[in-house]
């Protein structure tokens, strides 16, 4: 799948998959929202508004109110690709969220996820 296809996907379709991944491992929607807020700066209200709109996944990250500077400390692989080596800045932001949700699903404590 090309980056442009990922960027054009609906947030309302992608985000529930992230929540489902965490919930399958005993984590909660609130925890996913908390790591999303930590990463992007969206409040829960803003996130819910975006989920009810037709915003794309790419625009969700492009318009993030306050990307957390500590996100650059996120290291490791998502789908076999190291997030710190991803060249496209927008794709890297998307993979940061994937990585955080993956850590959540693996049972990592919230304090360690939100560096």
Image (cartoon, rainbow, N blue to C red):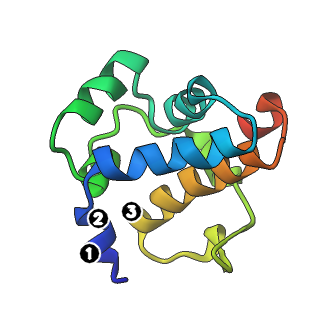
Query: Residue lying furthest top in this view?
Result: 45
Q: Assess whether mark 2 and mark 1 are in contact (beta carbons under 8 angstroms).
A: yes
Q: Residue at x 27, y 61 (%)?
A: 9
Between 42 and 29, the one lying in front of the other is 29
Please give left or right for residue 107 compared with residue 72 in the image: right
Secondary structure under the numbered disc 3 in the rendered image: helix
For the N terminus, the image quarter is bottom left
Query: Gap in Å between the C-alphas at discs 1 and 2?
Result: 5 Å
Q: Total marks drawn?
A: 3
Q: Quadrant of residue 28?
A: top right
Q: Is residue 83 above or below residue 61?
A: below
Query: Residue lying furthest left in this view?
Result: 54
Secondary structure under the numbered disc 1 in the rendered image: helix
Between disc 1 and disc 3, the foreground one is 1
Q: Residue at x 68, y 80 (%)?
A: 80
Q: Assess whether mark 2 and mark 3 are in contact (beta carbons under 8 angstroms).
A: yes
Q: Is residue 55 above or below residue 82?
A: above
Between 13 and 80, the one lying in front of the other is 13
Secondary structure under the numbered disc 2 in the rendered image: helix
Task: Tell me the number on the disc at residue 4.
Answer: 1
Q: Residue at x 62, y 68 (%)?
A: 83
Instruction: Choose the circle earlier in sequence order: 1 or 3.
Output: 1
Q: Residues within 10 Å of mark 2 (few under 14, many from 20)?
A: some
User: Where residue 92 sits in the image (x, y, percent)?
Assistant: 50, 64
Instruction: Choose the circle earlier in sequence order: 3 or 2.
Output: 2
User: Where residue 90 sits in the image (x, y, percent)?
Assistant: 38, 62
Between 66 and 82, the one lying in front of the other is 82
Task: Tell me the number on the disc at residue 90.
Answer: 3
Task: Tell me the number on the disc at residue 30.
Answer: none
What residue did someone put label 2 on?
7
């Amino acid at each position: 799948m090309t980056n442009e296809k990922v960027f054009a996907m609906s947030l309302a379709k992608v985000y529930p998959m992230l929540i489902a991944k965490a919930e399958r491992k005993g984590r909660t929607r609130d925890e996913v929202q908390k790591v999303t807020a930590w990463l992007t700066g969206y409040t829960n209200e803003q996130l819910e508004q975006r989920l009810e709109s037709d915003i794309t996944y790419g625009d969700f990250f492009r318009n993030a109110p306050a990307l957390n500077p500590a996100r650059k400390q996120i290291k490791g692989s998502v789908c076999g690709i190291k997030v710190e080596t991803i060249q496209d800045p927008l794709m890297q932001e998307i993979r940061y969220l994937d990585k955080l949700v993956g850590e959540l699903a693996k049972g990592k404590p919230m304090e360690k996820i939100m560096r």
